[in-house]
């Protein structure tokens, strides 16, 4: 089980990295092609399709590595026992949210299967919408594992030490 | 929406990742309005990723990470040291100029602050600068990075507010120079009072200038390429990000030859986590914004501000103060996403220029990165340099005043922001 999970994490990172690189390649290629007077009309669609998957796969990676931005200042004022309770509460609420995201996102992917993606016949929009429930399911696994770690380990789960990534 | 706001702040205060707090709070709006289809929150979440302009965000994050491994940082450091090393406050002056130079190749203040804390921080303290002032200079200096084009803040603001990104980029140059002069002056004054020595005592020779400029030329040319490319319509704003990634790889692999396969993979791996945390926040904030628009919150807030004054400059001052206060608790990315739809229509209706407002707004939102209790750049610098937040805050006061004065100048003199975009794009 552990090996399978490790394999899954690796596959997730490789996939996410590949999606990001494809985005760079097709957008850059599209720009160059237009400059050479051979505009390609499919680059935008490929890029946004990869974008959806990259976003939600990367979100799981960030969640697992504790690099999602959060505010620890107020929580740190509480005694450790209260802090532990807050951690459990947060993880529980997040798990509920993710379950709902899987349900509603899954339903959305199901009903949009006949809708074509960006008007391309034969390619269903479900391929894009499915990124959300799949990402949410991966994050739910991460959340459950975090709950388990929190129960085994008596330390309080914290965010990354050296600040948090931001777009700024 | 009051319940949504309360839920958001409570969850955030409880240390829940802001992305989840914003998504879950946004969802409570839909629970209060059961007539709305239950799939909408996630439909709009996914549709964020179908926004071609937002593609620029992950691309710029990658470009920044690749740039850091391309060997460009060392060259820019040499250049900054040749130009400002003889001024009072030496390395502090170098640090601020380096932030501005880095701004031309990357758009991230946090990345810049983290890099400088590692590269310059200890050396500044070793040369006699107090740790608090060192942290302040590195943190506040990074305000230049998002203002010098390209910047993710400008792309987000331009995308959400339907404002020309080319004009926003051009508009960033002069305010960045003003901010640099302001910070440089504040450092000079402090250095004079405390007797901080210059970094170098001898005047650099012409040959040294030449070598430093040649080394940094690829970084200096990048923003110029960008503006020229946008102006001539060679590429679109969303293509800039891809262009930046390819440019970083080009100079890393072929010009400076500092990049190798391992460095490439490491930068890509770092990017995965960065893209995830930033984009997840952006996509989920759509759930939150839906309620804001649905309940016409922008009109309500605009009404209460215009009830006080309808003078554009005064309104901008009020907005800037609100943004700075909010920025003490909320990240700049979220501020831009949530507040652009609220404030931009207000400024437009009063006859303000959207590009002018954009730059002022981005400066104000960036200040939130440096101010306690929750400043991402401050947190990063202080944790790397091990400086208590209180010391950092006390020693940063002159820098804060300098930025405040420049911000006021930018609000009341729109020409300072607008003359370059008007020159280039009209």
Image (cartoon, rainbow, N blue to C red):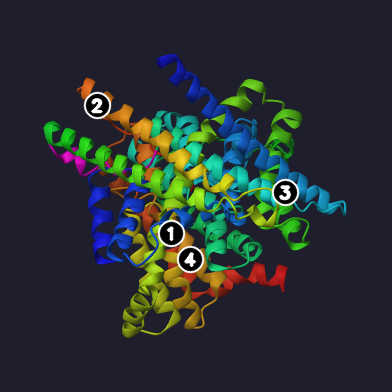
The answer to whether residue B385 is above or below residue B46 is: above
Secondary structure at badge 1 equals helix
Residue found at x 37% / y 35%? A140
Q: Are marks 3 and 1 in contact (CB under 8 Å)?
A: no
Secondary structure at badge 2 equals helix
Residue stretch rendered in magenta on the structure: A68-78
Mark earlier in primary sequence (3, 2): 3
State which mark lies toward you, 4 or 2.
2
Percent across and percent down for residue B97 are: 55, 46
Which residue is disc 1 drawn over?
B40
To the question of a shared chain for discs 4 and 1, the answer is yes
Residue found at x 70% / y 57%? B236
Secondary structure at badge 3 equals helix
To the question of a shared chain for discs 2 and 1, the answer is no
- Residue A76 included in the magenta stretch of the image: yes
Which image quarter holds the N terminus of chain A? top left
Q: Which mark is residue A86?
A: none
Q: Are marks 3 and 2 in contact (CB under 8 Å)?
A: no
Which residue is disc 4 drawn over?
B360
A86 or B224: nearer the viewer = A86
Percent across and percent down for residue A104 are: 41, 50
Q: Are marks 3 and 4 in contact (CB under 8 Å)?
A: no
- Using the numbered discs, state the Cα–Cα distance from disc 3 to disc 2 in whole angstroms: 44 Å
Quadrant of the rendered image containing residue B38: bottom left
- Main secondary structure along the magenta-highlighted residues: loop
- Using the numbered discs, state the Cα–Cα distance from disc 3 to disc 1 in whole angstroms: 27 Å
Which residue is disc 3 drawn over?
A43
B247 or B283: nearer the viewer = B283
- Using the numbered discs, state the Cα–Cα distance from disc 4 to disc 1 in whole angstroms: 34 Å
Mark earlier in primary sequence (4, 1): 1
Secondary structure at badge 4 equals helix
């Amino acid at each position: 089980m552990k090996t399978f999970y490790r394999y899954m994490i690796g596959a997730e990172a490789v996939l996410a990295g590949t999606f990001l690189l494809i985005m760079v390649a097709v957008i850059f290629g599209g720009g160059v092609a237009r400059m050479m007077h051979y505009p390609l009309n499919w680059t935008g669609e490929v890029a946004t399709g990869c974008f959806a998957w990259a976003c939600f796969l990367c979100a799981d990676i960030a969640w697992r590595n504790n690099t999602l931005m959060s505010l620890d200042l107020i929580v740190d004022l509480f005694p450790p026992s209260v802090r532990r309770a807050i951690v459990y509460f947060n993880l529980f609420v997040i798990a509920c949210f993710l379950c709902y995201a899987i349900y509603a996102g899954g339903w959305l992917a199901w009903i949009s299967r006949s809708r074509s993606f960006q008007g391309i016949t034969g390619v269903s929009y479900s391929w894009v919408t499915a990124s959300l429930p799949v990402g949410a399911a991966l994050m739910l696994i991460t959340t459950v594992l975090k709950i388990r770690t929190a129960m085994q380990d008596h330390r309080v789960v914290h965010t990354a030490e050296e600040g948090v990534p931001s777009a700024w | 929406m009051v319940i949504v706001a309360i839920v958001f702040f409570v969850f955030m205060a409880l240390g829940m990742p802001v992305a989840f707090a914003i998504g879950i709070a946004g969802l409570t709006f839909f629970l209060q309005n059961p007539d709305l289809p239950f799939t909408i929150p996630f439909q709009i979440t996914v549709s964020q990723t179908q926004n071609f302009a937002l593609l620029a965000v992950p691309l710029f994050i990658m470009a920044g990470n690749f740039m850091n491994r391309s060997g460009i940082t060392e060259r820019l450091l040499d250049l900054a040291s040749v130009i400002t090393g003889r001024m009072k406050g030496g390395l502090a002056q170098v640090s601020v100029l380096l932030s501005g130079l880095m701004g031309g190749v990357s758009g991230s203040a946090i990345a810049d602050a983290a890099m400088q804390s590692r590269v310059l921080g200890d050396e500044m303290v070793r040369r006699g600068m107090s740790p608090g002032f060192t942290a302040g200079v590195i943190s506040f200096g990074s305000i230049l990075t998002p203002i010098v084009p390209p910047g993710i803040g400008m792309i987000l603001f331009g995308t959400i507010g339907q404002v020309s990104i080319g004009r926003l980029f051009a508009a960033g140059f002069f305010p960045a120079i003003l901010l640099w002069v302001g910070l440089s002056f504040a450092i000079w004054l402090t250095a004079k009072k405390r007797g901080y020595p210059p970094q170098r005592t001898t005047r650099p020779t012409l040959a040294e200038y030449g070598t430093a400029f040649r080394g940094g030329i690829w970084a200096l040319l990048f923003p110029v390429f960008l503006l020229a490319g946008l102006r001539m319509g060679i590429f679109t704003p969303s293509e800039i990000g891809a262009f930046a990634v390819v440019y970083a790889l080009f100079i890393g692999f072929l010009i400076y030859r500092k990049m190798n396969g391992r460095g490439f993979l490491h930068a890509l791996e770092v990017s995965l986590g960065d893209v995830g945390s930033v984009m997840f926040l952006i996509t989920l904030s759509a759930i939150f914004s839906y309620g804001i628009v649905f309940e016409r919150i922008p009109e309500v807030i605009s009404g209460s501000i215009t009830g006080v004054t309808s003078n554009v400059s005064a309104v901008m001052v009020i907005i800037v103060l609100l943004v700075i206060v909010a920025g003490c608790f909320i990240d700049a990315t979220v501020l831009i996403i949530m507040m652009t739809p609220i404030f931009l229509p207000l400024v437009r209706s009063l006859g303000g220029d959207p590009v002018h407002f954009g730059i002022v707004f981005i400066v104000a939102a960036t200040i939130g990165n440096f101010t306690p209790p929750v400043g991402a750049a401050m947190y990063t610098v202080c944790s790397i340099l091990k400086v208590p937040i209180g010391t950092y805050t006390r020693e940063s006061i002159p820098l804060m005043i300098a930025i405040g004065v420049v911000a006021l100048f930018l609000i009341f003199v729109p020409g300072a922001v607008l003359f370059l975009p008007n020159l280039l794009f009209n």
